[in-house]
Image: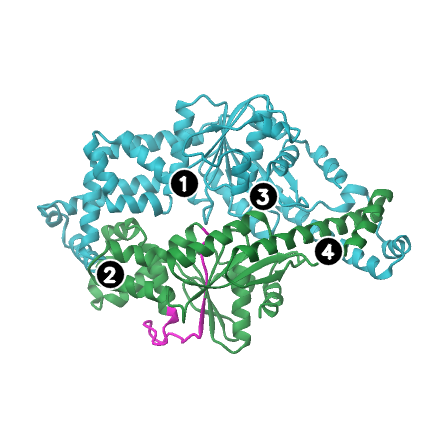
Amino acid sequence: MIVTGKGGVGKTTVAVALGLRAAAEGKRTIVCEVASQENASRMFDHTAVGFHEVEMEENLWSISIDPDESMREYVLLQLKVRAMRDMLFRSRIFNYLAAATPGLKELVTIGKIWELAQLDRKVKSGRKYDLVIVDAPATGHGVGFLQTPRTFASIARVGPIHSQAQTLDRFITDHDHTGTAIVSLPEEMPVNESAALEQDLRDEVGVAVDRVYLNGLYPERFSKPEAEKLAALAANEEGAVRAAARAALSEHGRARSQRAQLARLRRRVQTPVKTLPFLFEPELGVEAARQLSRRMG
Amino acid sequence: MPTLFECLEDKSICICAGSGGVGKTTTSAAIATGMAARGLKVCVLTIDPAKRLADSLGMEELGNEARQVDPALFAEQGVEIKGELWAMMLDPKQTFDELIARQAPDEESRDRVLENRIYQQISNALAGSQEYMAMEKLFELHTEADFDLLVLDTPPTRNALDFLDAPKRLTQFIEGRSLKVFMRPTGLAAKVAGRGASVALSVFKRIVGFDLIADLAEFFNAFSGMVDGFQARAKRVNKMLSDPSTCFLVVCGPQGEPINEAVYFHRKLVEAKLPFGGVIVNKVHYPAEQLRGAEPDDLPATLTEKLGDADLAQRVVANFSDYQALAERDARNIEHLATELRTRGVIRVPHLDEDVHDLAGLAEINRYLFATGEERVAMAAGRA
């Protein structure tokens, strides 16, 4: 399951919430971060996990996929002769080529995701996972990221990487086993971008889009007649009463404009939309993600 | 503490930097608007603006060229543009193509590069090329156009820092010094360079496929006449960025994560000796105490009495305390930010009730940005 969306919409929180839900259902699940931000492990108050599969809770693991480490692991799996590997890693040329080849970093990152999803793991004594959740790069980078295998397969027309890139492309576009979730916010721009993203994911990448999560939806705490009463209060009172009435009106206004954005989103995307509530929490830690995971259904 | 206008009035470049989703595009547009309103000729460069914002600025059919925004549009929102406001949407691929055309010694070398598949890849997708092209366009406008101030909305990078490394990364790639010698047809250089390098190359060939290497070789050959030009230009771009007439503004949100990223980005700016100008925090919840000096002890009883509805009063109180909790979090995070950055000059833009995507919203943000600290508190207090 690949979790996508524009920056700042709460992709990591949703990815972790999906992970918690799957783990609670007894599925062995791993949440992968690809931008080495380590936000997921930080949510669990865990120290940085790096390029290791680390257990956060029962059935739930986390890994930060670093492209250089992925490249190293890939080469180790390709080359059986130890002396050759050592020579390779010391070589400036090799490091330059690896850094300079467009898309190679993204390709080996996706390669690692693929490897994690295999029941017959390539890595020695690798754990078998029922579900791999990817906290994907923000939109813009996101679509390009998922297209890397196809682009690569067309550039490198021969050699082992050609067939491997094809394998990865089939893996990403396999609608039976791989899906995406788009995370959005109930605001004008994110709704527009989610609609565009859905189209790109379907038409350009060819991946299955399973769910759109509209994150941060304010509760409808006050009815319209109540809001009118509160408006009168805000106009005529002073001090805390006025401030409290204004906070209520602000909540009411935001909740209403968000409902309008929710309706727009539902009109503009083909995928079912699931709403997630705004959490009035100072910091969104693992307990916040757990609350969301219960609302996911 | 100086207002934003005082920060920017003697600058020629303002770069808004920060992670994605913090309102950078809106902030950049509002800054440009505010400076144009105060009599300057300003151009805002953006890569990926909100469609509605672009529409309202008349940017719909805009290509890679700056275009003046009709001042009448702002007059309707009560903002008088005394100077000129220009805007452009950056097309990184086209900018790169133009740069190639500019640097190529002749048409044949230009076409060889433009048609090369590796070039097409990097100009579209290589990490850093968008960022580099944003700076390239900035440099072009800076040296060739007569704007008083250029405002750059940096591309939404995964890491705001990518932006700073972009020119270096791209020129190193194009240069390809360590690679080119091994691609010469004779292969003589490879023999001279020793076994390690040739093994590395052959293994790499095996892994990625021969075609790619051939394409890379062709790419470096096509670029060979332009490397010096590129390097010289990258140097001048860097000089422009570190010039005292350039000002980096860090834009962030009030939550813990964006604040941490802003602290990190500020540190990197200082390390790179780039001129930091100030920090803008968007979507801040202002605390009610600061607005009114309120005493909420008997609030539930008072509200029940005034509203005649205990259930409603209870919900109002619950909602109020939720809002206060967010306001306290924001105040804490901003305090941390101010301490880390050793500045009192944090510009706090309130979380408006409507999300900002049109000119009216832009005009309102602009009023907050250019106010003094005291004025902002008063404005937030007067907000209906």
Q: Residue at x 63, y 38 (%)?
A: B361
Q: Which residues are magenta?
A: A116-139
Give the cyan chain's letter: B
Viewport quadrant of the N terminus of chain B: top right
Relative image position of residue B246 (x, y in whole percent): 48, 29
Main SS category, magenta section: loop
Q: At label 2, which amino acid type do we have?
A: His
Q: Pinpoint the chain carrying mark 1.
A: B
Element at label 4: helix
Q: CA distance from mark 3 to mark 2?
A: 49 Å
Q: Quadrant of residue B100?
A: top left
Q: Residues within 10 Å of mark 4 (few under 14, many from 20)?
A: some
Viewport quadrant of the C terminus of chain B: top right
Q: Which residue is mark 3?
A: B340
Determine whether B371 is above or below B318 in the image. Answer: above
Q: Pinpoint the chain carrying mark 4.
A: B
Relative image position of residue A36 (x, y in whole percent): 44, 56
Q: CA distance from mark 1 to mark 4?
A: 39 Å
Q: Residue at x 22, y 43 (%)?
A: B219
Q: Quadrant of residue B279?
A: top right
Q: Which residue is mark 4?
A: B322
Q: Residues within 10 Å of mark 1 (few under 14, many from 20)?
A: many
Q: CA distance from mark 2 to mark 4?
A: 55 Å
Q: Pinpoint the chain carrying mark 2.
A: A
- Return the disc, 1 or 3, that comes first in the chain's sequence: 1
Q: Is there a contact, CB below 8 Å, between mark 1 and mark 3?
A: no
Q: CA distance from mark 4 to mark 3?
A: 27 Å
The numbered disc on residue A162 is 2
Q: CA distance from mark 1 to mark 3?
A: 27 Å
Q: Nearer the viewer, mark 1 or mark 3?
A: 1
